[in-house]
Amino acid sequence: MIHIQNIAKAFGEIHAVQDVSFDVARGELFGLIGPDGAGKTTLFKILVTLLLPDSGSATVAGRDVVQDFRALRQMVGYMPGRFSLYPDLSVEENLAFFATVFGTTIQENYELIRDIYVQLEPFKNRRAGALSGGMKQKLALCCALIHKPDVLFLDEPTTGVDAVSRKEFWEMLQSLKKHGLTILVSTPYMDEAGQCDRIALMQNGQILAIDTPTGVENRFAKPLFAVRATNIYRLIQDLRQAPFTITCYAFGEFLHLTTQDGVSTGTIDTYLTERHHKQLEIKPIRAGIEDSFMDLMQHA
């Protein structure tokens, strides 16, 4: 459904997207995962025909993003990272406007948005600018879906909303996937990667890895430990200076420590006890998406 071949885009000296290639299958929920500045938004704008690539090619639903841009705009739904609806129009007026732009009506494609819109209906006469973050997100999704697109592009849709709204949003995407919709979503939140069928990890305009979430986690082959003590600042300093340490990063209340092969919890405990650390907790753990991402960055 989406085919990207060696796409590149630069803004002066900044290479926002560098030689990116991947495919997204029909009906797939594909995640583009990476921090701010990774190049996700630039790539999205190319795919929805808002930017021209400097080199490479891409097709969406069989249409070339440069040659067939007019036809393609009728076939995709796009929800940009910033709330871009009309704040002075009501919920219902925004939805009716976007339906009219695409030559359809709310009633014609209501089946696709019904589960989302029922949550908005009590506020249908409220101005869009007065909605909460989560409700703005739902309205923007409805407007992106109202013309029944073949492919849905969602650029960081859960940024800046509360945890409950984030959870609800991903549940809505899983429901939309059952309608056969192809979805490409970007997010800086590593914990959301597990919601996708496949993911591409992106940094500095480049793709670091493409796989299923489990496949990405399984690429992490080094010993990994979670470590904490009473003085977390001194703990990270001492561990980063340890002869067995490869990397050491803060992850919530624990540090995630990557070590050389053959290092045990006893080795780490002895090293830290000699340096007078108190209330030590050390345990081997399985790598998550974020651990794998940090490891891939070391070799990029």
Image (cartoon, helix red, strand yellow):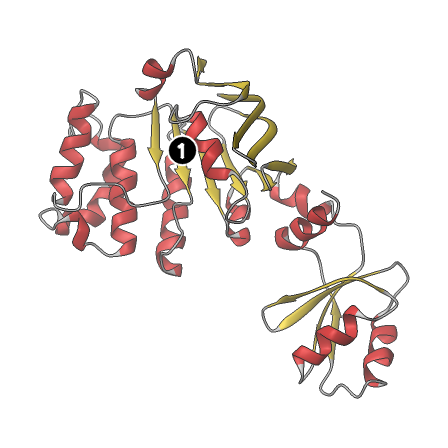
Q: Residue at x 17, y 55 (%)?
A: 130
Q: Is residue 44 left or right of residue 105?
A: right
Q: Position of residue 208 (x, y in %)?
A: 66, 39
Residue type marked 1? Phe
In this view, 165 is above or below 150 = below
Give the position of the C terminus as an image quadrant.
top right
Q: Residue at x 17, y 46 (%)?
A: 87
Which residue occupies the foreground of this view, 25 or 111? 25
Q: Position of residue 129 (x, y in %)?
A: 18, 51
Q: Is residue 268 left or right of residue 231?
A: right
Q: Residue at x 59, y 41 (%)?
A: 202
Which residue occupies the foreground of this view, 158 or 197? 158
Disc 1, SS: strand
In this view, 152 is above or below 189 = above
The residue at which mark 1 appears reads as 153
Q: Is residue 119 left or right of residue 30?
A: left
- Residue reaching furthest to the front: 12
Q: Position of residue 148 (x, y in %)?
A: 29, 26
